[in-house]
């Protein structure tokens, strides 16, 4: 006899197997083999080509990548603005593929906050900073006002609360935008190149605000940036190439024998479930690798050598 609980358990097992195991599904944000194809006038663009990404609750993740690599496409899907063509995208337990309109609205209102690159897109020009933060809140009255002031304080623009966007600098507007995005107390904050229109010093302030809200509110933050200065300040930065996560850099603080603390950073290639990885372009160029390479399994590593004619026994010189 199969009952409903049994069917549910089996469906959950199949979903976990598809995603490569239960642990891969347990992240706060999970993208698995995510595909997004755009069709315009008969031309297909595969913006995401099987992207994998797992982000834990409370993480601050930087995403870097060349223009056109699929960063905005990924964020638009994760924020519920766009739907993937195939694959799995799950945020805070919400499956973003095939959501009903009602659930999508609930997701966008309660779970995610968003900061855009264009400062004008984040704030209403005729409202003050405080009114902009209060507008999306579910709270009312004095609590609403207190919460707005707390958020503006947290991002460092409390003294500008009464000003309209036009009376604030670009960096202040973006920090205010971070406060607006947090007004509804979301679990996840997405920011698409929020410092793209700012100079370096101002960009650092905006990034500082994102770090503060991540640390103080525990909100999971994913920030797309092509500012390597910014990407160098986080514990984890993921690089996207041609619609896939290609590599990531993890930084950790280590204490040396003499007590001094120094930062160690390690770059990793991302290995997908099928065992595929992408070699860094610099490596490919340095050894002029092309078409095929030779792999050797050593006890503790794998060797990759050029598969050039002459050294390749399969191929006559
Ligand atoms: N709405 C769309 N219609 C057609 N193609 C699109 C659309 N949005 C993005 N693309 C294409 O998808 C690819 C990835 O774009 P995007 O995600 O904006 O990259 P990034 O944010 O990394 O610069 C690009 O080739 C882009 O031209
Ligand atoms: Mg973009």
Image (cartoon, rainbow, N blue to C red):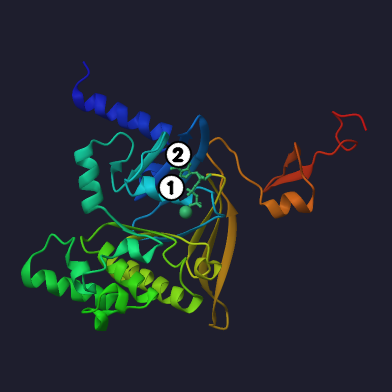
Q: CA distance from mark 2 to mark 1?
A: 9 Å
Q: Closest to the observer: 214 or 202? A: 202
Tags 2 and 1 touching, CB below 8 Å: yes
Return the x and y of residue 268 as percentages of the image width and height.
58, 54
Badge 2 residue CB within 8 Å of ligand 1 = no
Viewer-side label of 2, 1: 1
Q: Closest to the observer: 133 or 300? A: 133
Quadrant of image for the N terminus: top left
Return the x and y of residue 97 as percentages of the image width and height.
33, 36
Badge 1 crowding class, 10 Å Cα cut-off, few under 14, some 14 to 19, many 20 or more, is many
Does residue 180 appear anywhere in the picture? yes
Q: Is residue 110 above or below residue 156?
A: above
Quadrant of image for the C terminus: top right
Residue indicated by mark 1? 74
Q: Residue drawn 61% across and 43% down?
A: 277
Return the x and y of residue 241 as percentages of the image width and height.
57, 49
The label number, if any, that marks residue 10 in the structure image: none
Q: Is residue 276 above or below residue 139?
A: above
Residue indicated by mark 2? 34
Badge 1 residue CB within 8 Å of ligand 1 = yes
Helix, strand or loop under label 1: helix
Q: Is residue 290 above or below residue 222?
A: above
């Amino acid at each position: 006899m199969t009952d409903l609980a049994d069917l549910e358990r089996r469906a959950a097992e199949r979903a976990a197997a598809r995603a490569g195991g239960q642990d891969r599904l347990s992240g706060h944000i999970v993208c698995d083999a995510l595909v997004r194809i755009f069709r315009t006038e008969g031309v297909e663009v595969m913006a995401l080509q099987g992207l994998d990404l797992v982000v834990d609750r409370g993480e601050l993740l930087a995403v870097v990548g060349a223009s056109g690599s699929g960063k905005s496409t990924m964020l638009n899907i994760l924020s519920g603005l766009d739907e993937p063509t195939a694959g799995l995208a799950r945020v805070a337990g919400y499956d973003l593929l095939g959501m009903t309109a009602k659930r999508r609205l609930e997701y966008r209102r309660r779970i995610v906050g968003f900061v855009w690159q264009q400062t004008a897109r984040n704030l209403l020009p005729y409202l003050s900073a405080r009114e902009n933060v209060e507008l999306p809140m579910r709270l009312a009255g004095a609590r609403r006002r207190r919460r707005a002031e707390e958020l503006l304080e947290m991002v460092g623009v409390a003294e500008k609360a009464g000003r309209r966007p036009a009376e604030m600098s670009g960096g202040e507007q973006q920090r205010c935008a971070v406060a607006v995005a947090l007004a509804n107390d979301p679990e996840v904050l997405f920011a698409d190149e929020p410092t793209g229109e700012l100079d370096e010093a101002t960009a650092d302030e905006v990034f500082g605000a994102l770090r503060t809200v991540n640390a103080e509110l525990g909100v999971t933050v994913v920030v797309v940036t092509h500012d390597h200065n910014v990407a160098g300040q986080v514990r984890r930065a993921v690089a996207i190439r041609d619609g896939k996560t290609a590599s990531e850099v993890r930084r950790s603080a280590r204490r040396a024998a003499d007590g001094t603390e120094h930062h160690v950073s390690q770059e990793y290639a991302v290995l997908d479930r099928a065992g595929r990885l992408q070699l860094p372009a610099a490596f490919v160029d340095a050894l002029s690798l092309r078409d095929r390479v030779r792999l050797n399994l050593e006890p503790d590593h794998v060797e990759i050598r050029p598969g050039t004619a002459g050294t390749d026994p399969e191929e006559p010189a």
